[in-house]
Structure formats: structure tokens, C-alpha cells
Amino acid sequence: MTSGADLDLDDPRTDPQEVARAAAAVIAERTGADRHDIALVLGSGWKPAADALGAADAEVDHADVPGFSAAAVAGHSGTMRSIPLASGRRALVYGTRTHYYEGKGVRSVVHAVRTAAAAGCSTVVLTNGCGGLRPEWAPGTPVLIGDHINLTATSPVEGANFVDLTDLYSARLRDLAREIDPSLDEGVYVQFPGPHYETPAEVRMARVLGGDLVGMSTALEAIAARQAGLEVLGVSLVTNAAAGISENPLDHQEVLDAGQAAAQRCGELLARIVERI
């Protein structure tokens, strides 16, 4: 097997699963944990929520793990945490993600999910900060993802591998989340490529297509998670009204501020869900 340092996700000759296994081996070595059970990907606005999951007994810089790179977006953390849970299981918490708009390729976008599977995880929780298309969802509202529309015009699945996405976002986990917080609503997430925000016309298109939430992440990761056999829970934090829904201009600082304001509720919600998965 090639050493982790020599593995290049951009090289089409490289097997992305081999890079994921190399990354998982480094994580196991650095954290002292042979395996992890649940992975969480924290999106914009979710960074403060990580603390509610419990104290990490090990942290690893993303840039020190094969296939990963440092955080490129404000509001993300450059470290991954290994957190022992009261249930006796262990959570692997990614403080950042690679976005499609960074131009590093789809393999890099979904590498964290594939690494989670290689590290032993059976479940992944994907979170994001997003624009809301429903006026009743004020900034700071968490919303379960029931389905998605992928408008990136690409897929992480390579070759003639026909992955069924019928029940991609686990109904069991959504029901569990609503047992914990019956006020949780759910919607359809629409991933645009970014990094620019959507135009009002694009938001209207998303509504016509059946979308309720718009953002720049999650869908590609969810597809890769399903291919890897992971059970997927998606949770969006509405950080702003989408273009054309609100008269105010869109601003990434607004995303961070809404996340900070909702941190306690979202952190407690995640912690309670993760303990029962």
C-alpha cells in the first residue's frame, strides 16, 4: 500500500478509498481510538455546538491527515475532535468541510465522509448553514433534511455504480430527532455550486422544483455516505432568508451571527440526538 503522504486525490489513478483508509489510520494513531462510531460534519454557524457533545480527549489538525486540508471558510474549525460519549461509543467531529466551490474536486468534497466509514462509523450527521425559503423559518431555526436536489451537475459516484437514493436521509433518525424536539420541521435542501449566493430568480426556481432550503454543501457528501453504507441525518440551520425572500442583502457574517445565537439550542439538540443514535 502506498504511504499516506504519497496519496493524491487529484490523481485519477489514485483509489479514493485507499486515501480514506490511510486517513482513518492516521486518525486512529493520533487519537488512540481504534474506531469511531458516529461522524459529524459541522457547517457554517455550527462550530459552537460542538462543545455540547462533550469534551474531546484528542484533537487532530485536518491538514495533518491524508486528503484533508485546513479550513477555508470563516466560521469553521481547522481541527477534528474525537469525543467519547456517555453511551460508550465515540464520535468523530469534523470542524470543517471542503466545499465544491473550492475547486479541489468532488473526491476532496466527500473525503471526510469516506474517511468516517473507513474509521468504523455507521452513521453520519451532516449539518450546514443555509438560506430559508419559508418565511416562517426565522434565522436560527434548525430544520431536518428530508430530501435534496443536487444542482452541482456532478456526483461523487464514479463509474457504473448505481446507488439508490430513495431513502437517503434516514426516516428513523428524523423520527428520533422529532422525539427529542417535536417542534422540528423538515424540508428539501437544494445544493447550488456557489460560492456566490443564489439570485432571486434561482431561489424562485428552487421553490418551483420543491426546495425549502438552499446552500452550497451537504448533497454530495450525503450521496457518498449512502454509497459507503452510512445512515445519514441531515440538519440545516436557517441562518438567513434566501435572496428575494428578504429585502436585505446576503452576508456571510449574518450566517455566523445566526449560528452563534442558536448555538445552545443546536448544540443541545445534536448532543441528545447523538446519544440516542
Image (spheres, grey):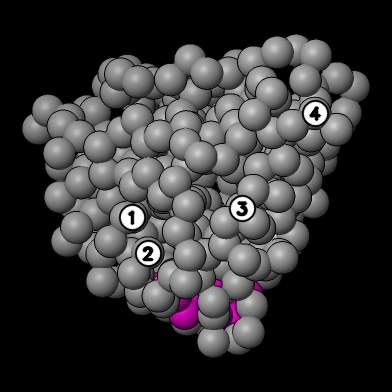
How many numbered discs, if any? 4
- Residue positioned 24% across, 54% down in the render: 259
Residue under numbered circle 1: 46
Examine the structure image and report whether residue 274 is included in the region drawn in magenta. Answer: yes
Q: Mark 2 to mark 1: distance in Å?
A: 7 Å
Earlier in the chain: of badge 3 and badge 4, it is 4
Q: Provide the major secondary structure of the magenta segment.
A: helix
Q: Is disc 2 placed on a helix, strand or loop?
A: helix
Residue 42 image offset from top left, x and y in percent:
42, 51
Vertically, is 119 above or below 151? below
Inter-mark Cα distance, 3 to 1: 22 Å
According to the picture, the residue beneath numbered tag 4 turns out to be 2
Nearest the eye: 240 or 101: 101
Residue mark closest to the camera, 2 vs 1: 2
- Write the start and end of the magenta stretch as one range: 269-277
Q: Amino acid at mark 2?
A: Ala
Q: Tell me, yes or no, whether the two marked residues, 2 and 1, touch with CB atoms within 8 Å.
A: yes
Q: Secondary structure at mark 4?
A: loop
The residue under the point 43% across, 20% down is 102
Point out the frontmost of discs 3 and 2. Answer: 3
Quick one: label 3, few (<14), some, or many (20+) residues within 10 Å? many
Which of the two discs, 1 and 4, labels the residue nearer the N terminus?
A: 4
Camera-nearest label, 2 or 4 = 4
CA gap, disc 2 and disc 4: 34 Å
Spatial CA span between label 1 and label 4 = 35 Å
Asked whether, in this view, residue 88 is left or right of residue 50, the answer is right
User: From this viewpoint, is residue 217 visible?
Assistant: no
* Label 2 Cα neighbours within 10 Å, binned few <14 / some 14-19 / many ≥20: many
Residue picked out by circle 2: 50
Q: Of 145 and 128, which appears nearest the observer?
A: 128
